[in-house]
Amino acid sequence: MKLAIIGAGPGGLYAALAAVKQNISVDLYEKKQVGEGICCGECLFDSLGIMPQLGEGLLHPVREVILKGRDHYGINMSRRRKLWMLDRKTWQQGLAKQAVAQGICLFEQTEITPDRLLAMQKDYDWIIDGSGAPSITSRAYHFSREYFRDYMAAYQVVLKGDFSALWPRIKVGFISDLPAELQAGYYWIFPKDERHANTGVVCTVHEIQDKERLQLKKRLANVLIDEKLTGAEIIESGGGMASVRILPRLVFDNIILIGDAAGLTSPLHGGGIDMACFSGALAVSFLTDGSQDVGEYQKSLTASLEDKLNLEATAVQKMKALNFCDFDKLLAGVTSQRNTIRAKTALRHPDLLYATYRWLEKKVEPPNWPD
């Protein structure tokens, strides 16, 4: 089998490493250098409970998240699904080196256009598209608008300053004046070390709307004032979007969509690294198992993510339905150290309790998982 993979992001790299274990000939195409052009908080939440110890590029585990509503609340992550701060550039470059060492052909600085993609379909048995959103496939098959039905828009800066009081924790703050139609929305401060932090804001958008209405740069400027970070040096900035709904179709002839190209971004927190990695390995498993129809890839993917996405949808609905004061009470209740307060909160929000239980009990087994 001859396989092309577009995009050397997390999904594409995990797909490549899974494929080489099955002795598949792999050409991996990246439009930039591996690890370039990343605009990400670089905090990896293992929401599926599947990620291995990450090795090269792993900075440190995050033991506590500070949630800010009207007050500050700490949530201990040491007994829950793992959370890490990454240097994604180093991590992805390490995965790429591993892939090349195992025989994968990596083509950097190679942009795949829609016309070239259509031509490649004749040269490869299968193509895995991990090119992001909107994907190369969407431009070739004319469905780019699907990514803008429900999506998150974000703007981030990398700051140089004094983050010793927060590090190695991270902070997520909820915006009091954010209208319900832009929820889920929040800002983040993710220190990579005591001197550098990724800081940004994100809002959810339904259908294509005027970007000026989001006012992301203005919202971030207000965050920097409120958090007393205006004296920090901005050394990088950037923004982007990601769909927060799985696309209705993920297989187009001999092309399979993974990661952001498939719409695999959390509707709650905007992360998607673990889902991208999982989808890449899962796609390869359907290519190598002749007893399965590749068209079943989407059903298997959706079933694996069902409980995670149900929990996130429930949490997003709380953010939309509750006023800021009541949402703050929910934050206080779920983070309380007192069992009686947590129990009362659970009784007031049984749907959230049930969704959380289902998510924590879910066991996902990633196929062809890279070593």
Image (cartoon, rainbow, N blue to C red):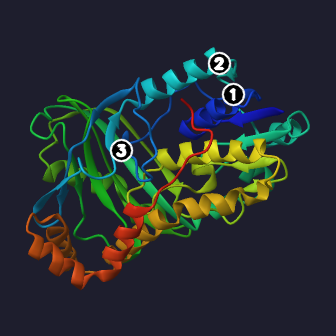
Mark 1 in CB contact with mark 2 (< 8 angstroms):
yes
Q: Position of residue 309 (x, y in %)?
A: 47, 65
Residue wearing tag 2: 102
Residue toward you, 66 or 294: 294
Instruction: Measure the C-alpha gap from mark 1 to mark 2.
Output: 7 Å
Q: Position of residue 291 (x, y in %)?
A: 81, 51
Instruction: Please indicate whether residue 95 sits to the left or right of residue 239 in the image.
Output: right
Residue wearing tag 3: 156
Instruction: Measure the C-alpha gap from mark 3 to mark 1.
Output: 35 Å
In this rendering, the count of numbered labels is 3
Say above or below: 109 vs 41.
Answer: above
- Of the two numbered discs 2 and 3 on the same chain, state the one appearing first in sequence: 2
Q: Position of residue 350 (x, y in %)?
A: 30, 82
Mark 2 in CB contact with mark 3 (< 8 angstroms):
no
Q: At x 58% / y 68%, what residue is drawn? A: 149
Q: Where is residue 246 in the image (x, y as percent from the top left)?
A: 60, 62
Say above or below: 13 vs 169.
Answer: above
Residue found at the very far top of the displayed protein: 101
Q: At x 56% / y 70%, what residue is drawn? A: 207
Say above or below: 313 vs 294.
Answer: below
